[in-house]
C-alpha cells in the first residue's frame, strides 16, 4: 500500500530530480534511498536468511564450533 506525501525541497534539487531521475520516477527513487534507513530489521533478517542459505558457510561454522568444543574439553 502506498501513501501520498508532500515534501518541500530546494528548487535546484527539484530541478535536478526532474532532469536526472525523470518526472514519473522521483517517488520510487526517494523511496529506494529512504528504505534502507527505515527498514533495518528487514535487511538484518534478509542477511541472516542469505547466510543460512549458504551451505558451505554453515558447514564450516559447524566444524569450527565442534573443534572449539573439543579444544575446551581438553
Image (tube, helix red, strand yellow):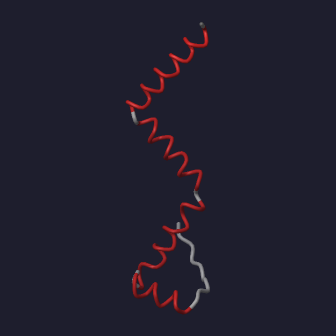
Q: Residue at x 58, y 54 (%)?
A: 40
Q: Residue at x 42, y 32 (%)?
A: 57
Is 25 rendered above or below residue 74?
below
Q: Residue at x 52, y 86 (%)?
A: 13
Is 74 rendered above or below residue 25?
above
Is 42 rendered above or below residue 35?
above
Q: Nearer the viewer, residue 30 or 16?
A: 16
**Residue 23 location, x and y as percent?**
42, 85
Is 43 rendered above or below residue 55?
below
**Residue 10 location, x and y as percent?**
58, 89
**Residue 3 location, x and y as percent?**
57, 73
Q: Is residue 8 left or right of residue 52?
A: right
Q: Residue at x 46, y 79 (%)?
A: 26
Q: Is residue 18 left or right of residue 74?
A: left
Quarter of the image where one finds residue 24:
bottom left
Q: Nearer the viewer, residue 45 or 59?
A: 59
How many numbered badges does the structure rendering display?
0
**Residue 70 location, x and y as percent?**
55, 11
Query: Residue most toward the top?
Result: 74
Amino acid at each position: 500500500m502506498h501513501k501520498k506525501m508532500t515534501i518541500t525541497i530546494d528548487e535546484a534539487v527539484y530541478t535536478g530530480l526532474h532532469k536526472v531521475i525523470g518526472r514519473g520516477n522521483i517517488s520510487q527513487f526517494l523511496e529506494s534511498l529512504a528504505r534502507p534507513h527505515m527498514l533495518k530489521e528487514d535487511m538484518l533478517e534478509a542477511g541472516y536468511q542469505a547466510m543460512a542459505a549458504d551451505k558451505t558457510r554453515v558447514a564450516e561454522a559447524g566444524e569450527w564450533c565442534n573443534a572449539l568444543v573439543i579444544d575446551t574439553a581438553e
